[in-house]
Image (cartoon, grey):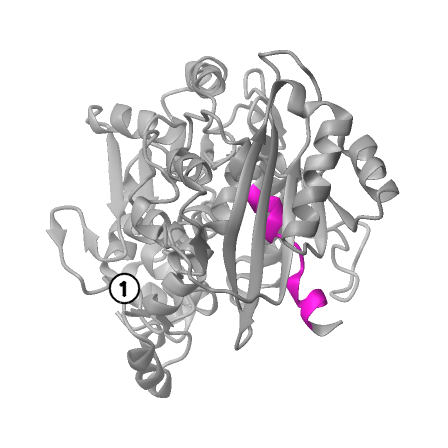
Amino acid sequence: MDIKEITSSKELRIHTGEKSFYFFVIYYFSKHLRYKKMAKYHKERCNEAQRTMNIYCEGHRESAKTTILWIAFEIWKICYKKCYFICNVCNDAKKAKALNFIIANELFSNEKIDEDFWRLFQKKKLQTDEDFMSEKSISEFTTTNWIKVKAFGMGESLRGELYNHKELWFVRPDHVLFDDIDNTKNTKNRRIINDDLIFIRQEIFWWMDSNWQVIRLWNVIRQHGRNPSQREAARVNKKRIVFETFIYWEKGKKSWTPIWERFVNTDEEMEVEHVKWNMVTSLESKQREEWSNYIQNWVWTPMMPWETIIDYEMIKYWNAKDFDYIRMGCDPAFSTKDASDAFWLVVTGHKNVSWVMYYYVLYCLKLTWVKKKQNTAEQIVENLYKKWNVSRIVVEKNNWWQYFADWLIRRDLAVDKSNTSKDKLTRMKEHEGIFQRKQVFFAEWTEELIDQLIEFTWEDWNEDDLADAFMHSIDQEWWIDVLF
């Protein structure tokens, strides 16, 4: 149904009766849906949420699962007093608090809700709209019709939570929502995942009463994460509903036509649709923005533990002879112990073509044993610096970087430090696009670096410091060298 077909709360009640969640969403939240029509799966989710106690919902990015099943659904329950104590659980409590703020703001400022249900949230100290809520997050609040909403992070137990209701005395939680418990960072370690699953079972599910409603809005980062485990448990339980909605298909029905009309495949289609409606998005533009993440976020194919980030097909060889400038990446380590880290060096040429930077790996070297001694390593680096006419040496900031950088500076070499707090997996993902866009080329004698790059996986770390030195050689702000 068109959102614009219902124009007043009176018509809302004529169509559906006053307690239909689906038409509540259409009427009160049309401004948040970013498109004229809702998808078929939106109606199915709304209907099931209204009559089913346990829902597990997976959906592609921007499928409105948070807008509908978190924000709108909780506000609907607050308006009609369908629950008394709402608990919102996220991996990071900050996100839950930020969503609490959105709910409170909607209860305060939505004119349609205010007209039909009176103002359901009022900050006591502030009376004017201009002063309303200077903060951007709320840990917990109580509505004017005595519904409590509280935010939790992973590890914060719901056990023993009680709310002193004005009329009902002490009330336990009766609505629990989980949203995006898994992310790229917290799904690397299976022990942490297992600990979190035990916590959810023992500190949340174990204490639930039969009248608790549980909504799970989760995504799949890896197949062994918290979310897939909960999904499989939901599938075998007849009292739970599982929604799996992809950008191109619904369960049991696959096609390559987007199932929500606010998405189109190409930029050309988007330009045509923008003439008719507003807020149409092309999946072609999403692919450009997200690259490999598009497969996970939209088509919903999680990365497997054994899959690599850089495929062999991405490796290209170079025949260029001139470069705008050349950089050397260093991952220093000094020791003669066999088990200690090696000292890694990668020399990379940079060439700017029409404001697109291309990278040419000219040389790579692994220093071990006595070659890692200070004087020897300094001499090797200086020789490579002069041989390849290097403009900058980028030294990774680790236990040895300060000493080594000072030693190189005394030899009158240009040195920069790479001060990154990101893990190698995150940094490799950030550089994946330049391989996919064919901006990286290798010399035939750099096979050791090539092997490390194509063997770099999500969980099997192997030897990867040469790949790290390569990233140091390319991740500086290249336009500074070009312009100045």
In the figure, residue 53 lies in which quadrant?
A: top left
Q: Can you see residue 308?
A: yes
Disc 1 marks which residue? 260
Residue 77 place in picture, x, y as percent: 45, 45
Q: Residue furthest right?
A: 410
Closest to the observer: 339 or 21?
339
Residue 267 inside the magenta-drawn segment: no
Residue 14 place in picture, x, y as percent: 30, 67
Residue 221 is left or right of residue 301, and the answer is right
In the figure, residue 480 lies in which quadrant?
A: bottom right
Residue at (63% x, 33% y) in the render: 166
Residue 476 inside the magenta-drawn segment: yes
Closest to the observer: 292 or 55?
292
Q: Pick the quarter of the image with the C terminus.
A: bottom right
Helix, strand or loop at disc 1? loop
Q: Can you see residue 145?
A: no
Residue 127 place in picture, x, y as percent: 78, 59
The span picked out in magenta is: 470-482
Q: Main secondary structure of the magenta part?
A: helix
Residue 22 is left or right of residue 176, and the answer is left
Residue 76 lies, with reference to residue 421, above or below; the image says: below
Residue 11 place in picture, x, y as percent: 34, 71
Mark 1 crowdedness (10 Å alpha carbons): few <14, some 14-19, many ≥20: some
